[in-house]
Image (cartoon, rainbow, N blue to C red):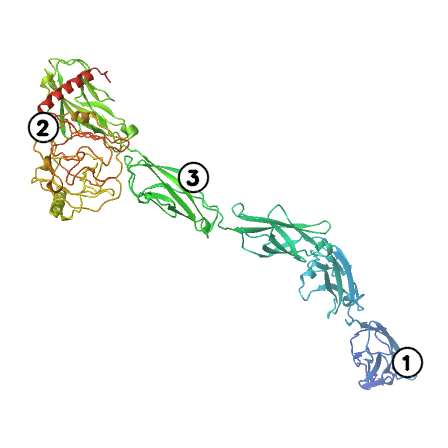
Amino acid sequence: MQNIKCSLPLEAMINSPLNIYRLEVNVQDLNDNAPAFQTSIIKLNISESAFPGERFPLQTAFDADVGSNSVKSYKLSPNEHFSLDIQSGGEHSVSAELVLQKALDREKQPVILLTLTAVDGGKPPKSGTTEIIVDVLDVNDNIPVFSKSLYKARIIENAAPGTHVITVQAVDLDEGVNSEIIYTVVNHNNDKTVNSFSINPESGEIIVQNNVDYEEKNAIELRVQAKDRGSNPRAAHCKVLIEIVDVNDNIPEISVTSLVNTVKEDAPIDTMVGMITVTDNDAGKNGQVNLKIQGSIPFKVQNSYKNYYTLIVNGPLDRESASKYNVTITATDEGTPPLSSTSVITVHISDVNDNAPRFPDPVINVYVKENSQIGAVIHTASAFDPDVGDNARIAYSIVGGPVTSMININSDSGDIHSLQSFNYEEIKTFQFKVQATDSGVPPLSSNVTVNVFILDENDNSPAILAPYSEHGSVNTENIPYSAEAGYFVAKIRGVDADSGYNALLSYHISEPKGNNLFRIGTSSGEIRTKRRMSDNDLKTHPLVILVSDNGEPSLSATVSIDVVVVENTGDVKTQFRHVPIKEESFSDLNLYLLIAIVCVSVIFLLSLISFIAVKCHRTEGSLGRYSAPMITTHPDGSWSYSKSTQQYDVCFSSDTLKSDVVVFPAPFPPVDAELISINGGDTFTRTQTLPNTEKPRVPNTDWRYSASLRAGMQSSVHMEESSVMQGAQGVLVQNWPTVSSAADNEGGEVSPPIGTAVDSNSWHFRYGPGPGGPPPHLKPGEVPPEAFIIPGSPAIISIRQGQDGDDKSDFISFGKKDEKKKKKKKKEKKDKREKGKDDDD
């Protein structure tokens, strides 16, 4: 701090006397110094945002003088923004402040120059000056300004990324960072189309960033922002409208708005199938589309309104030929170059029952082995129906006929099952029809003929024919000792009910092994000698003949023959011996079976006796008129009832166990049948029955007899105890001869319903009316000679039926008993001579 008082203290010393004197010299100031500032220039930085009234302290001036000669005031050069405020801090302290009187604007006057003058209080006063430079600091008080508020541009769609669109420009009057502008695209609505463009933040150039699609938006509006870099940045906005130019870049789109599920195959023409809509997002000709169907199909496209079309039927439909149609539709626009698209519409055709089931073949041949298992599937009938669903669901059935008891068919699968086991020997073939019916409305059906052929199986063993057919017996044949080589001994005849190779028989001597005396023809069955007899040979040669068929497996039968060597042919005898049969063990099951058989037999016999007794005791008063009796035999040896005959009973006496009845058909069969009773007392009972108008079957004209049957017809007969046939009302009594014996027990081959021989242990008759009544010349009670009964032992009767239906029955003339043996011996000798001449087999 500058002192106002300036004094100089002094001390003076005197030696004699020594004294010290103190002195103070005051120096008075003169105004010999002018005020001065430390710097010649004062710089002030004042923000243009400063408010009026703000004060800015100024640098004070220094004056070496003191007191009144020091700085007493300051002066400021004239200006419109600042004023000077002088402040006195005391007698010797004066300061000045710069006061802002008017707001500053950097954009108008960035720098203000002022002069500050300091004046002292001397006389004359002296002064000193300094320059004040006021730098107006910029404030971000200006927003950027675009050259245009709306920019417009055009660009084609699908322009490549980086393609220039337009450049926007903005200006900011501020300086520095406050004038530096950043450009951005504002997308407040998050519009995806805006993202197709980008802007350079420094230059404001707008370019294509992503794909531009006219169909998505034909014009895009961008909002561009210009923002400065100030601490408090300020921004401005403008609009950029970009127009997209269309290019034919969209192919037409085909869509089916409505389509029926199925179309019936009998649908008429112009039936609507579906509705089609075609869209093309391009504009102008690029969006105009033409539609057509490819190929030749029974459909067409018809325009209904603008881009709406209908698909309709244009021809006949057949589901069996085509169950569905793939309709190919092509849509082409009119752009340059034109674009097209193709769509395939599948139209399903629904079925109509217009096809009947069809079998692969009109006739089916089925081969079934005999003895097949009951219920086995012999064939599967399969029909095909081109329809579908219920129209093709087939049910199988057998059309009528008696075969329904033999076979059955599964209605669903068509499996034909056998209801019985077939026997080739009984039935060889039969025919029936199978009908296949669908489930449509109305149902359709078709038939197929099925021929069933029964295949023979080797299920029948060979059977030995008479005279060697008796089971369990040994037959004897005599040959003379003088027999030559090749002498005929016997002939074995066998039959097999099978057919083909199963019935082809071969004959072999199975025992004794290594036999060197006899041989047998493998196919003829003739037994002959290999050589002459010798003294070393046995007198009796037991032979076992094996008869085998050629089936698989082979079945066989055996017959035993004892060949007896005799010295004289007159000593030939027929000897029979029984082969011992091995008894089987008797089990409990056999006992139960035996008891059951006995009980059933007793019940049957009691019923039969009661029935016969009732019939025999009927009164004769019921007979209204005479009818000639008629008795016929049944071929199967059983009492039976035929539709063409009426049943009657015959009563026999206790001695009829050895009796047989053989009936000769009369040329005039009776209209009605009667009951004839034959008993020991020669009585009979007769009952009348209702007349039967049915005609009996015509007998088969093929009557064939074996050699043994013809030999039996030559047998002698002697009269034994006669039986009595009593006519109506006891008027006619006739005695008939009986046959005492027969040559053999071989029966003839006959055709039903008339037989020849009747077993002596069974009586079975069938009576019935014929086509006419009794002869007019007969009186009541008389029996015509054509119908009679022969009681006694078995007899062989020769009966022939003419082609014209006339009966040609002949009665056998029987000889005496003593002539029988002679005739038999003569016949045997004759046969042996004939056999000896035959060649070896």
The answer to whether marks 3 and 1 mark residues whose Cβ atoms lie closer than 8 Å is no
CA gap, disc 2 to disc 1? 214 Å
Q: Identify the disc placed on residue 362.
A: 3
Mark 3 or mark 1, earlier in chain: 1
Position in image of residue 236 (x %, y %): 75, 68
Which image quadrant for residue 533? top left
Which image quadrant for residue 73? bottom right
Image quarter of the C terminus:
top left
Q: Identify the disc placed on residue 126.
A: 1
The answer to whether marks 3 and 2 mark residues whose Cβ atoms lie closer than 8 Å is no
Position in image of residue 234 (x %, y %): 74, 70
- Residue shown at 15% from the left, 20% from the top: 828
In this rendering, the answer to whether 21 lies above or below 530 is: below
Position in image of residue 768 (x %, y %): 21, 41
Out of 835 and 220, give the one closest to the viewer.
Answer: 835
Q: Nearer the viewer, mark 3 or mark 1?
A: 3
Question: Would you say 740 lies left or right of 114 here?
Answer: left
Q: Amino acid at mark 2?
A: His
In this rendering, the answer to whether 82 lies above or below 229 is: below
Out of 343 and 369, give the one closest to the viewer.
Answer: 369
CA gap, disc 3 to disc 2? 67 Å
Which image quadrant for residue 802? top left
Mark 2 or mark 1, earlier in chain: 1
Q: Amino acid at mark 1?
A: Lys
